[in-house]
Amino acid sequence: DVRSLRHKLFMEAWYSVETAMELEPHIPEGSPIVVHLDVNPDKRWASSRHISEVVGLVMGQGFEVLFKPDAWAASRTADHVVKNKHQATITIP
């Protein structure tokens, strides 16, 4: 149950951190794991109000962070879900 945008962004960031922690033992030492966040510093977007908190959450766990417009993985995933690109298209001849 997502109660607010802030809650949604924190949950997404934490799931990413959990994934990064699971992958970390399998990554060569010295290779950074960079977490991509679906937050935008542009004040026109509501997520800008929460950027410092979610970036702090990720960095506090020792991972590097990218956010929009540089977070290409987050942007691609968000587009995939929001624009219904995740649904298979069936073409019947």
Image: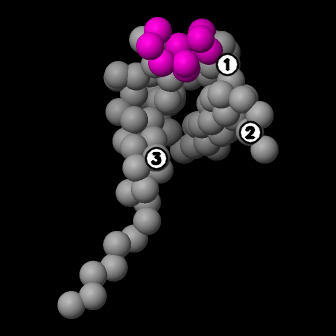
Identify residue for label 1: 57
Give the distance between the C-alpha atoms of the residues marked 2 and 1, in whole angstroms. Answer: 18 Å
Give the distance between the C-alpha atoms of the residues marked 3 and 1, in whole angstroms. Answer: 24 Å
Q: Position of residue 44 (x, y in %)?
A: 44, 13
Q: Mark 3 against mark 1, which lies toward the viewer?
A: 3
Type of secondary structure dominating the magenta stretch: helix
Identify residue for label 3: 82
Q: Who's the residue at 39% across and 35% down the image?
A: 75
Q: Who's the residue at 27% across and 88% down the image?
A: 92
Identify residue for label 2: 2
Q: Secondary structure at mark 2?
A: loop
Q: Which mark is residue 74?
A: none
Q: Position of residue 20 (x, y in %)?
A: 59, 37
Boundaries of the magenta span: 43-52
Q: Position of residue 59 (x, y in %)?
A: 60, 16
Q: Mark 2 against mark 1, which lies toward the viewer?
A: 2
Q: Secondary structure at mark 3?
A: helix
Q: Depth check: give the residue in front, 28 or 18.
A: 18
Q: How is the image coloured?
A: one colour
Viewed as shown, does residue 20 lie left or right of 83? right
Q: Secondary structure at mark 1?
A: helix
Look at the image and say whether residue 48 sits in the magenta stretch: yes
Q: Is residue 53 above or below residue 12?
A: above
Q: Depth check: give the residue in front, 54 or 89.
A: 89
Q: Position of residue 57 (x, y in %)?
A: 67, 19
The answer to whether the residue labelled 2 contacts the one labelled 1, judged by CB atoms less than 8 Å apart, is: no
Quadrant housing residue 10:
top right
The three-letter code of the residue at mark 1 reads: Leu
Sooner in the amino-acid sequence: mark 3 or mark 2: 2
Sooner in the amino-acid sequence: mark 3 or mark 1: 1
The three-letter code of the residue at mark 3 reads: Val
